[in-house]
Image: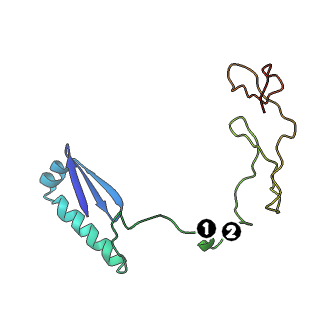
Amino acid sequence: MRYSETDNLTYFLIFGYRFLIQDTNTIASGSGINVRKLAAAAEKRFRKKDSNLVETSKEEISWRGCPLSSLPFINNSNLNVPRVTPSPNHSVLVRLPLSSTPDKPPEPYPRKYTDAWDTHHVRLPCSPQNVYSVLQ
């Protein structure tokens, strides 16, 4: 457990969870509760719930989470995600679903290339509206 005090605010970091107790002077003096003892008791209760809990330093943690394959109802065939569709805020550049053969490149979507040739978009050299020659 670590704590820090700034401007009558106390932050407790217990097992990676950050707790904020505001106005520690009022809590400590008004009710006679020692905030540090309260946090120590909370940590003790937390340890009792899980006796196998092992503390690790931040340097020992290389990643967080678990592999997708270890989750019971999620695999590549059952992802339970919404269908991918183009919208004003989302561009789809390949035709879905993807091919099952890994050596075949994905097909472009839409098939016919259209670009916006105005001041709000990047002017690509491959555009049919480009008047400058492109060296290959």
Q: Which residue is at the far right?
A: 112
> Sequence-wise, which precedes: disc 2 or disc 1?
1
On the image, the x and y values in percent for residue 124 come to: 73, 28
27 left or right, relative to 20: left
Left or right: where does residue 32 sit relative to residue 60?
left
Residue at point 78% right, 33% down?
136
Marks 2/1: CA–CA distance = 7 Å
Q: Quadrant of residue 53?
A: bottom left
Residue 66, percent from left and from top:
53, 68
**Residue at the spot x=36%, y=64% of the render?**
59
For the residue pair 120 and 19, the one nearer the viewer reads as 120
- Towards the viewer: 74 or 96: 96
| Residue furthest front in the image | 136
Q: Is residue 59 above or below residue 118?
A: below
Q: Which residue is mark 2?
A: 75
Q: Disc 2 marks which amino acid? A: Asn
**Point 81% across, 55% down: residue:** 97
Kindly state the secondary structure of the residue where label 1 is placed: helix
**Amino acid residing under circle 1:** Leu
Of residues 102 and 98, the one nearer the viewer is 102
Task: Find residue 83 and report its horizontal and vertical position in percent.
Answer: 75, 52
Residue 68: which disc? Answer: 1
The residue carrying pointer 1 sits among few (fewer than 14), some (14 to 19) or many (20 or more) residues within 10 Å by Cα, namely: few
Query: SS of the residue at dot 2?
Result: loop
- Horizontal and vertical percent position of residue 84: 75, 49
Check whether the beta carbons of the residues at disc 2 and disc 1 lie within 8 A of each other.
yes
Q: Quadrant of the N terminus?
A: bottom left
Which dot marks residue 77?
none
